[in-house]
Amino acid sequence: MTKISFKTKLKAVEEYANGNVTLASVRHKYGIAEHDFQIWVGIYASFGKGPLLNPPKVTGGGSDKSGKVEQRKIGVNIRKLYALWI
């Protein structure tokens, strides 16, 4: 998957949020995976553009590839947000 810039991500979500286009048409226009775009739209709808422009950072890692996501005061719980989409 190609990395999508924060500016493009926000532009795509706002274009969809304006209600003039379908989710599928925006995804295809910007080359965004369906699952990713649904999550971005949900985050935008629930919390605004802040979390899209300033996502949590993954720290740690190393050879075991484990990392911890920096927790923020905005209270975004990705697992709960994802569960809303299912």
Image (cartoon, helix red, strand yellow):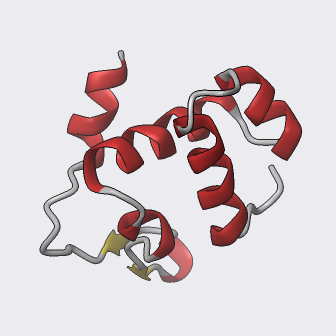
Q: Residue at x 20, y 73 (%)?
A: 71
Q: Is residue 83 left or right of residue 62?
A: left
Picture residue at 65% right of the left edge, 25% below the top:
23
Determine which quarter of the picture holds residue 86: top left
**On screen, 14 above or below 73?**
above
Q: Residue furthest top?
A: 86
Quarter of the rendering containing residue 83: top left
Which residue is rendered at x = 47% and y = 40% of the image?
41
* Image position of 19 with respect to 73: above or below: above
Across and down, in percent, residue 60 comes to 40, 84
Q: Is residue 13 left or right of residue 82?
A: right
Between 85 and 60, the residue placed more toward the observer is: 85
Residue 31 percent across, percent down from the top left: 84, 42
Residue 37 image offset from top left, x and y in percent: 59, 38
- 42 on left or right of 30: left
Q: How many marks?
A: 0
Q: Is residue 31 above or below residue 10?
A: above
Image height of 23 relative to 6, above or below: above
Left or right: 45, with 25 as reference point: left
Q: Nearer the viewer, residue 59 or 71?
A: 71
The x and y percentages for residue 19 are 57, 28
Residue at 21% x, 36% y is 80
